[in-house]
Image (cartoon, rainbow, N blue to C red):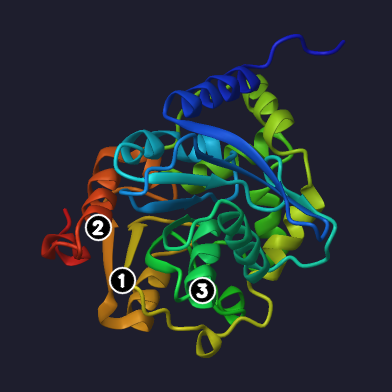
Amino acid sequence: MSKCFSLTASRNWCLRSGFTRLGLRSTVTDLGDGTVMHCWVPKVRKPTRPDLVLIHGFGANALWQWYDTVRVLAPHFNVYVPDLVFFGESFTTRPERTELFQAQCVKRVMDANSVGKMIVVGLSYGGFVAHSMAAQFKECVEKVVIMCAGVCLEETDLKMRLFPVTDVEEACNILLPQTAEKMKELVAYTFVKPPKGLPSCLLNDFIDEMCMQYVEERRELLRAIPKDRKLSNLPKITQPTLIIWGDQDRIFPLELAYRLKRHLGENAELVVIKNTGHAFIHEKPKEFHKHLKSFLLNSSVPPNANHQNHK
């Protein structure tokens, strides 16, 4: 018997309506090479405001990950929220699976919307894409925010036990849950204090709506991240950069935040949000948005945003 009601689908509809109320509209751009990109764009672009791109990570779609942030930033920026390839309504028939390719696709969507200069904000996997955009398109990307994204990881880190898992396939099974039990495991990895009593029927509903499409393609995206990855080959972006991390992140451990700060040097600032994990944007949204707005709306990060001053 088919299910007649989905709480996840209902929530998704509410979020779409919310984006519309916040002044965004849904667009689909055919890039002409077998790639189609969906993106939320301003209904009316205001030339006096900076253009800001919010790039989501794995997990729930961009609506779920960015709604609260769009609500905070929409009064100050022209906000663009793309679905990365193989998420939401974006897909490709091309074989590329790297963050470099994802970055190029996002840039082409911005080109299609006549966006020249932009600020990019990337969450988790989206942070890899944001870093790649900043490296590839230096003349276009003016500021960067990288959040809980292990951009500086190396392929050898898996074998050296930096992560709770020892190989990419194990990581895929956690990050791409196909059962309620695996979803509970993912929640336990991402929250310091995971929500208790989540019913399996609700989790299965979420999986059916959010996690069943492009499963193998998303596995390929994950496999591409550590492949032949070395810090010595990582471009050193020069734009002002804010790095935000949860101090108890188990997906990308805090060591990777310090590594990225050392790699980028003086043009980067690091904020560590205490008593949070990979899902800090949900665990402490007010603190997260305070630091994000401070960096985006000012010419530089205030001194008290440094991680050493956090409590």
Q: List x then y, in percent, for residue 77.
A: 35, 45
Mark 1 or mark 2: name the one nearer the start of the chain. Answer: 1
- In the picture of the structure, the residue carrying the numbered disc 2 is 295
Q: Height in image: 258 above or below 147?
A: below
Taking the spot 53% from the left edge, 55% from the top edge, the residue there is 114
- Alpha-carbon neighbours of circle 3 within 10 Å: few (<14), some, or many (≥20)? some
Is tag 1's residue or tag 3's residue first in the polypeptide sequence? 3
Which residue is nearer to you in this view: 297 or 258? Answer: 297
* Mark 3–mark 2 distance (CA, rounded to whole Å): 21 Å
| Residue position for label 1 | 240
Other-residue count near label 1 (Cα within 10 Å), few / some / many at <14 / 14–19 / ≥20: some
Is residue 11 found left or right of 303 in the rendered image?
A: right
Q: Residue at x 44, y 64 (%)?
A: 253
Q: Nearer the viewer, residue 177 or 161?
A: 177
Amino acid type of disc 2?
Phe
Circle 3 residue:
137
Secondary structure under badge 2? helix
